[in-house]
Image (tube, grey):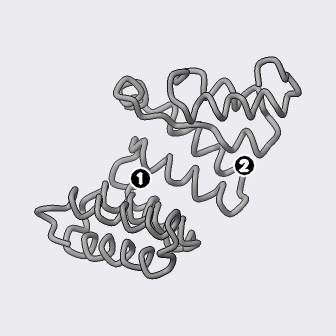
Amino acid sequence: ADPEFSIASEGLAAVYMTQGNAYGCGEVCSNKALEILENLKNKDPENDRVSINLAQTMVELNQVEKAVPILKEVLKKDPKNYFAYNGLNYAYRYVGLIEKSNLMYQKGKVDDNYTVLTEKGHRLYNNASLYEGDYTGFITSLQEDNDSFISRFYQGLGYFYLKDNEKA
């Protein structure tokens, strides 16, 4: 985990997570991903991208209590960091703090960078609204991205919950 090659190392960590989640490698691979990202963060503590990837991996490994402070640390340095808001949105939703999750979505969406990032293909979906039962709000958060498979899938899910079978 050399900071000079941090993007490649982060990619390797993502591969380990995929192996752990989807292909049965389990805890061994997930722990390897965590180890890579922790090493990168220790060697380059100011790298927000590494911090955010580490935090998101921690959430996936049910370590939300460790992830949230990392994401908040990023926001202290960069209060407009869309990806940190997205990470908090996910972390809070993961542990059932839906109101806080929704708040992080709202804060991230207001950010000036949101428009620029959405033009580059990044999306911040309001999955918290799905958990709150605000299916229309959930669908609306997805409509900016009609072309992606994941967006179409979740729009269909929202319409399913609205009992609009024609659109689902």
Q: Secondary structure at mark 2?
A: helix
Q: Quadrant of the N terminus?
A: bottom left
Residue at 54% x, 39% y: name it: 107
Nearer-the-camera pick, 57 or 21: 21
Q: Amino acid at mark 2?
A: Glu
**In the image: residue 82, left or right of residue 24:** left
Other-residue count near label 2 (Cα within 10 Å), few / some / many at <14 / 14–19 / ≥20: some
**In the image: residue 92, left or right of residue 53:** right
Using the numbered discs, state the Cα–Cα distance from disc 2 to disc 1 in whole angstroms: 19 Å
Residue at 52% x, 66% y: name it: 21
Residue at the limit of the structure toward the top, as seen here: 166
Q: Secondary structure at mark 1?
A: helix
Badge number at residue 19: none
The quarter of the displayed image where residue 165 is located: top right
List the residue tagged with mark 2. Answer: 99
Nearer-the-camera pick, 89 or 146: 146
List the residue tagged with mark 1. Answer: 75
Residue at 42% x, 76% y: name it: 29
Q: Position of residue 152 (x, y in %)?
A: 61, 28
Q: Earlier in the sequence, mark 2 or mark 1?
A: 1
The quarter of the displayed image where residue 93 is located: bottom right
**In the image: residue 84, left or right of residue 151:** left
Residue at the limit of the structure toward the right, as seen here: 163
Residue at 39% x, 74% y: name it: 34
Q: Position of residue 46 (x, y in %)?
A: 24, 62
Q: Position of residue 54 (x, y in %)?
A: 39, 65
Q: Quadrant of the C terminus?
A: top right
**Is the residue 146 above or below the residue 106 in the image?**
above
Q: Position of residue 5 (x, y in %)?
A: 14, 61
Q: Amino acid at mark 1?
A: Leu
